Image (tube, rainbow, N blue to C red):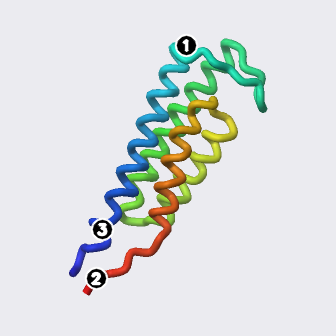
Amino acid sequence: MPGRGRRLRKTEIGLGIVAGSLGIVLGLLSFFEVLPYRVDTFIPHNADTTLLVSILMVGANAIGIFGALTVHKHHVIGSAVMGFVTLAVLIIGFPWQSISAVAYIMSIVMALVPVKAIQ
């Protein structure tokens, strides 16, 4: 059946888009200080760095959505893009960004599994 592999990549694309959208929403909520929780892990967070990190998380998750959309044609490249976004979200992001990171990791693992054609 031609095109069978493309139909099976919809789950990975969907998980990546959900992770990116959730990350953007969480980044915007932290930008508008709805989620005021701050952690001083690598970067001491004050008002300016909180806004900067929020903007970085929105941008990184937008790139993650692009990586999820790339999975349809080039699953390895899309997985690599989502992997870099996951690292950025886990290292720089706020603790609640780990929710989107888990969804990214699930999408990456599923996208790297080879799709076998059913005959």
10 Å crowding of disc 1: few (<14), some (14-19), many (20+) = some
Quadrant that contains the N terminus: bottom left
Mark 1 highlights which residue?
A: 33
State the residue at coordinates (71%, 14%).
46
What residue is drawn where x is 57% and y is 34%? 97
Q: CA distance from mark 3 to mark 1?
A: 40 Å
| Closer to the camera in the image, 95 or 63 | 95
Q: Earlier in the sequence, mark 3 or mark 2?
A: 3
3 vs 2, front mark: 2
For the C terminus, give its image quadrant.
Answer: bottom left
The image shows residue 118 at horizontal and vertical percentages of 28, 82
Q: Secondary structure at mark 2?
A: loop
Contact (Cβ within 8 Å) of mark 1 with mark 2: no
Mark 2, residue position:
118
Q: Amino acid at mark 2?
A: Ile
Give percent across and percent down for residue 84: 60, 50
Question: The disc labelled 1 sits on which kind of residue?
Answer: Glu
Among the two numbered marks 1 and 2 on one chain, the one whose residue lies closer to the N terminus: 1
Name the element at disc 3: helix
Separation (CA) of disc 1 from disc 2:
50 Å
What numbered label is drawn on residue 6?
3
Question: How busy is the neighbourhood of tag 2: few (under 14 within 10 Å), some, or many (20 plus)?
Answer: few
Vertical arrangement, residue 87 with respect to residue 38, above or below:
below
